[in-house]
Amino acid sequence: MQTKFSRDVVPLSDLKVNPSKVILRTNDTHRPILLTSRGCGVAVVQSLDDFEKTAEELRFIKAVAKGLADVREGRTANLDKAREILGIE
């Protein structure tokens, strides 16, 4: 889902004229589109499915990083303690 700046940059005025074309392109290419105003980036348009997938992946990566930090800091529990915490026998 890498943005291709040769194809994925759209002036904001184009979005105003034909928004469905921009949305369809994000759905077809699965790449975000950079919207510009006067040559400067102002926003990104991304399909909802791709946005949700990216958000889920980011939550997963953050959870893994937190788990690794917990291990590094010694915040761990053995199997018996984990079962006790979770109420599992």
Image (cartoon, rainbow, N blue to C red):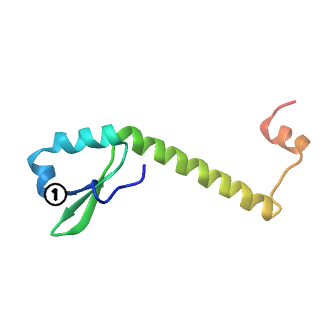
* Residue at x 34% of width, y 56% of height: 4
* Residue at x 16% of width, y 57% of height: 12
Q: Quadrant of the C terminus?
A: top right
Image position, residue 16 (x, y; %): 11, 50
Q: Is residue 74 above or below residue 31?
A: below
Q: Is residue 72 above or below residue 28?
A: below
In the shown orientation, is residue 64 left or right of residue 49?
Answer: right
Tag count: 1
- Most distant residue in the front direction: 6
Rendered image quadrant of residue 7: bottom left
In the shown orientation, is residue 57 left or right of residue 27?
Answer: right
Rendered image quadrant of residue 23: top left
Disc 1 secondary structure class: helix
Query: What is the crowding at mark 1: few (fewer than 14 residues within 10 Å), some, or many (at least 20)?
Result: some
Q: Nearer the viewer, residue 80 or 12?
A: 12
Image position, residue 8 (x, y; %): 28, 54
Q: Nearer the viewer, residue 80 or 10?
A: 10
Q: Amino acid at mark 1?
A: Leu
Residue indicated by mark 1: 12
Q: Is residue 18 above or below residue 10?
A: above
Image position, residue 39 (x, y; %): 19, 69
Image position, residue 78 (x, y; %): 89, 47
Q: Nearer the viewer, residue 2 or 79?
A: 2
Q: Is residue 57 above or below residue 37?
A: above
* Residue at x 53% of width, y 51% of height: 58
- Most distant residue in the left direction: 17
